[in-house]
Amino acid sequence: MAHSFPSDFLWGTATASYQIEGAAHEDGRGVSIWDTFSRTPGKVKNGDTGDVACDHYHRFPEDIALMKGLGVKAYRFSIAWPRLFPQGDSVREERGFDFYNRLIDALVAAGIEPMVTLYHWDLPQALEDRGGWANRQTAYAFADYAAACANAFGDRVSTWITLNEPWCVSWLSYSMGIHAPGKKDYRAAVAAAHHTSLAHGLATRSLKAVNPAFKVGLTVNMTNYINESPGDPVVDEVIDLLDGNYNRWWVGGVQNGEYPATLLAAYGDLVDGVILPGDMDLVRCENEFLGVNYYRDEFVASARPEDLPLRDRAYMPFDQRANLSLPERFTGKLTDIGWPVTPHGIKDLVLRIHREWPGVKAMYITENGCAYGDEPDANGVVNDQRRVDYLRAHLSEVSKAIKQGAPVRGYFAWSLLDNYEWAEGYSQRFGIIHVEYATQRRTIKASGYEYRKIIAHNAVN
């Protein structure tokens, strides 16, 4: 049975600047928080850094040619803030602007639509030194940076994503210490969660002030929390907190101008002096789309009732209050990074968004992919059949969701290239194109050829 897509469905691939560009010390680029974090002993597997990564900074013509050969219609890439403004202030680095102008011009010449993400985690270190996303002023600096990008590139870029995965920016970075800047400060994470929302609202207005016709959206990572102990009210309570913290905070803020009430009650005085009068009017804004990053569902086996409700300001993430575990049915069926494969979840999620936030006019699946470490065989062929199966299964579910009314307008495979996978370094491979890091040789995997076929037929057959 063929699972088809609308005739104007946008097929793309996605990357992020620090994960692929390299050239970390070239052409005046400033230091980012990931440069600092990756050099901190014990923070990144094998001590890997993004200094070279996929050397996309020098090899982007080859990568664009590969995309064109796959039939890709759009390329979602991020701009490195420190390349344009090395200190995160108003002092420009023109060589950085020149690089992105060359990249965008090459994409347009190849007939590939550039979709720009303004922030994919590489904050200028100078801004972090002043508090980073826990500092309200970073949201205003971001709005100024967005305006500069709009003025520089807006004659060729019409679709803009403000921030990528603000939950990761807030919680993995400021509470759990897993991502740069590696802090473990619950209060700072709550502040960052609000300031990223504020930054999106301010940046949306900055972009629209340059060109009201721009299509602007926010990309959020979302999941479905599956209750493995139905009927347990304590599990219900912790799932509500998890869902509010992970799924509802940003979408509800942007769409309705409000955060989950149960979450605000749990945070208590942590939001005092953070959410100021008038802020939610700034957070709420009209966007043309929502970007959705989906990888897998989460499973809640039980909860720790002694930790609920959040009493005495016990500063710990809600996922430490839940016993997250994988059901036995996933034994031996995880991706290399340890995630279950739950393709039905992508359909459930976009239908939920459509149902609960009817103001979302359109959605793009801005990331979806899996980590499998298949290498070229003796003939140079990368037969990553598990990724082929993952891609087909998830796209089949997206097709079903569209037929049930979900306004999904496009899909961006994560990732175009094997690349620097944040705290996992180079140990995980998500690409549909294999990269041999020592030589920078690119090899299209079986999944890349499968994606080309899907794009050509506008269907999963």
Image (tube, rainbow, N blue to C red):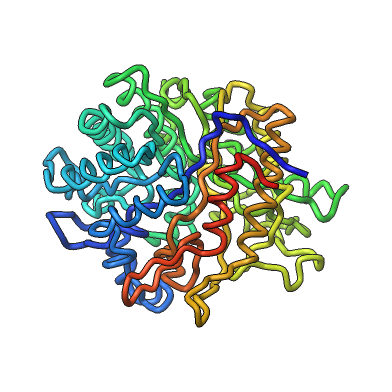
Q: Where is residue 388 in the image (x, y as percent from the top left)?
A: 62, 59
Q: Count the marks.
A: 0
Image-based side of 370 in relation to 420, left or right: right
Residue at 45% x, 20% y is 281
Residue extending farthest to the bottom is 378
Asked if 124 appears above or below 261 in the picture, the reply is: below
Q: Where is residue 395 in the image (x, y as percent from the top left)?
A: 65, 46
User: In the depicted view, which residue is nearer to us: 111 or 18?
Assistant: 111
Quadrant of the drawing holding the N terminus: top right
User: In the depicted view, which residue is nearer to us: 268 or 114?
Assistant: 114
Asked if 58 appears above or below 113 in the picture, the reply is: below
Residue at 42% x, 63% y is 422
Residue at 28% x, 30% y is 156
- The image quarter containing residue 276 is top left
Image-based side of 51 in relation to 112, left or right: left
Q: Position of residue 194 (x, y in %)?
A: 45, 37
